[in-house]
Image: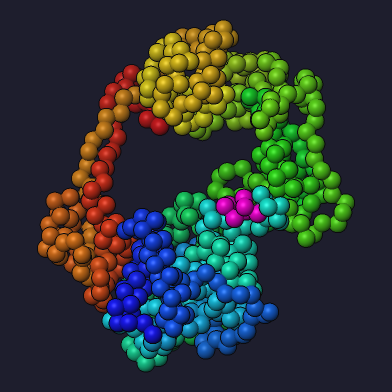
Amino acid sequence: MATDRVQARFEELRRLINHHNYRYYVLDSPEISDARYDALLRELREMETAHPDLVTSESPTQRVGAPPLDEFGTVAHREPMLSLANAFSLEEFVAWQKRAERLLSGRIFDMVCELKMDGLAVALTYEDGLLVTGATRGDGYRGEDVTLNLRTVRSIPLVLPTGGRFPRRFEVRGEVFLTRAGFKRLNEERAAQGQPLFANPRNAGAGSVRQLDSRVTASRPLDIHIYGLGWAEDGDIPPTHWESLLMLSSLGFKISPHSVRVETTAEVEAFYQRWLEGRDDLLYEADGIVVKMDSFELQREMGAVAREPRWAVAYKFPGIQATTRLLDIGINVGRTGSLNPYAILEPVSVGGVTIRQATLHNEDDIRRKDIRIGDTVVVQRAGEVIPEVVGPVVSLRTGQEWEFLVPPRCPACDTSVVKPEGEVISRCPNASCPAKALERLRHFVCRGAMDIDRVGFKLCQALFEAGLVTDVADFYYLTKDHLLTLERMADKSAENVLASIERSKCSSLSRLLFALGILHVGYEVAYVLAGHFATMDRLTAASQEELSAIPSIGPKIAGSVAAYFQEEDNHSIIDKLRRVGVNMEQPLAVTVARLPLAGMEIVVTGRLESMTRAQAESRIRESGGVVGSGVTRRTTHVVMGANPGFKSEGGRALGTTIIGEEEFIRLMEEPRYSFQAAHSQHPGKPIRLT
Ligand code: IVH
């Protein structure tokens, strides 16, 4: 039997490890180093080995998974796990809202907007503060018992804080998912081991939760966002969904920091648009937003029809993935002569856009993903980027597929292609390959480069074929008469084209450098070079040594930049550009320090460890922030201390972020700057800073 001292240390270790798990996995803000954490865990393990009677299932050492099961047991859901009605447009969302208002006889209701995570729905049951069951959704009425697996997900609390206020038995529901980075890492590992790859994070996440061997689940970087209460007994719950999320957060559950409480259609639409545009910035995949009625009483009144509640709706983003057949692989010659394979697809609609072609990156990528001509493939379209082939659906192979081989000669000029040792891309070495010249023009005008928006690919091609533009400087020597010789070019559009070319003369040096298409000079590198040298003259005079001395410029880039400026042809292009008044300087940016909390309104709740409430409030004010007394639509951050008082007066919060003490302190200490252009060479025409 363990002595009292052992018992006390044992309990302390468990408390500490649970606390640090919470900091790390729920708040994303660890307080101690990994090594320190490992030491605590090791000490606990050793103690448990010496005193096996101390081990209980909620010990943090028990998250490693258990021996495999033959099959999952089933769990009956006490309240069915419903699915959601979908809205695919603002009109459809408004129709949902109107119908809800009608059913409530015109009473208006608050709503909570959340992201719709693309993962696997689970239900977690807690009894007396301990996790007892974790289940999948299954058919909505019965799910699989995946308790052992879910216990390995570090952001799921196994025990709730002692002294916390929560019902004796209750169920929370949420979405388990893999982050995009976790998915990428997992697939890389699988590729290295020659195992088939997962098509997307959703499949990988769902597959990881539904593993009979929970040790496999434990090895996968799974995360969860809790999006609501299922049911509760023996204890009070708040009257609204929003407050129940705050309560769950205070109990250590991970809830999405992006959820907001709103009143109007316009706010819902703003939230939708915010994340439609920003979804690529999320660490995980979201396929829409979910809008829920806030009041539980109104939710009850609304009830459900069929298997969908009437109090919630999923307002979906246009889909980004679909499967189709890879009919063939074509080759484009890039501006650096790279042979870029692209997929020729059986046309398929992805999020309302028909896709016929998609990028395949490079031949190594095709080989790594084992994509074969004739395969059924998953294609993906994200934001405005070019659609890409994610990978093959190996299970649908018929044996009629064949491997792709890079052609030995350039498809545009028939020169033999080269592939230097260690490079992943084959290139056409011919300096005057017409495909390269055209691609250089196309790159020059594109949005991230000189942004000549009236000159698209078709016009580049027409100008090139007519011999009117052969290098990038020729754009600036075009006249209206030239343009009018082209087919389908009217007076007005010719003027617009010329105006658009004229405007581009004020682009910053960084844009110009990027636009020139120097090998290995992407936008970031161009920005570094322009910031360092400030003028084209200084840059062209720089030696390779000077270039490689710049932080973040390696020898490969330095070599390629130096080589570019040694070429006579390139000098003559730059001279031609200079003669017509294209800007060759980087505008100076002056850095203006701002107070770290400027523009923020912060509510502190609970006890902070390193300062009193009064100190926290005066630090917020000193740092330029506003102290809020309750959560309102103006609140930008809620600082959660220990035992947070449950802010039942909590109002609507659009874009409120919940942070811990550590992050709060970091926020105040972080210097913040804003940038302003200090001078411009073209008076009256400010140079674009970025
Ligand atoms: S609420 C009755 N909230 O979407 C309410 N679901 O199509 C149903 N999902 O099975 C769930 N994010 O897996 C809700 N913030 C969120 C969600 C969410 C993702 C999933 C969930 C559910 C499916 C419904």
Q: Relative to 482, is 364 above or below?
A: below
Q: Looking at the rendering, in which quadrant would you find the N terminus?
A: bottom left
Residue 110 as seen in the image, left or right of residue 360: left
Figure quadrant of residue 395: bottom right
- Measuring from the top left, give residue 458's x and y in whole percent: 65, 30
Residue at 23% in and 60% down: 602
Q: How is the image coloured?
A: rainbow
Task: Farthest residue to the right: give it.
Answer: 400
Q: Is 259 or 610 nearer to us in this picture?
A: 610
Task: Farthest residue to the bottom: give it.
Answer: 234
Q: Is 352 or 395 nearer to us in this picture?
A: 395
Figure quadrant of residue 409: top right
Question: Mainly helix, strand or loop, the magenta region?
Answer: helix
Residue 39 as seen in the image, left or right of residue 164: right
Query: Bounds of the magenta span?
Result: 184-190
Q: Is residue 186 magenta?
A: yes
Residue 15 as seen in the image, left or right of residue 133: left
Q: Relative to 433, is 613 above or below?
A: below
Residue at 60% in and 19% down: 483
Q: Is residue 290 magenta?
A: no
Q: Relative to 567, is 192 above or below?
A: below
- Measuring from the top left, give residue 146's x and y in whole percent: 57, 77
Q: Relative to 442, is 22 above or below?
A: below
Is residue 100 visible in the rendered structure shown here?
no
- Measuring from the top left, give residue 24's x and y in whole percent: 39, 61
- Measuring from the top left, give residue 351's x and y in whole percent: 62, 55
Q: Looking at the rendering, in which quadrant would you find the C terminus?
A: top left
Q: Is 487 or 174 nearer to us in this picture?
A: 174
Residue at 32% in and 82% down: 3
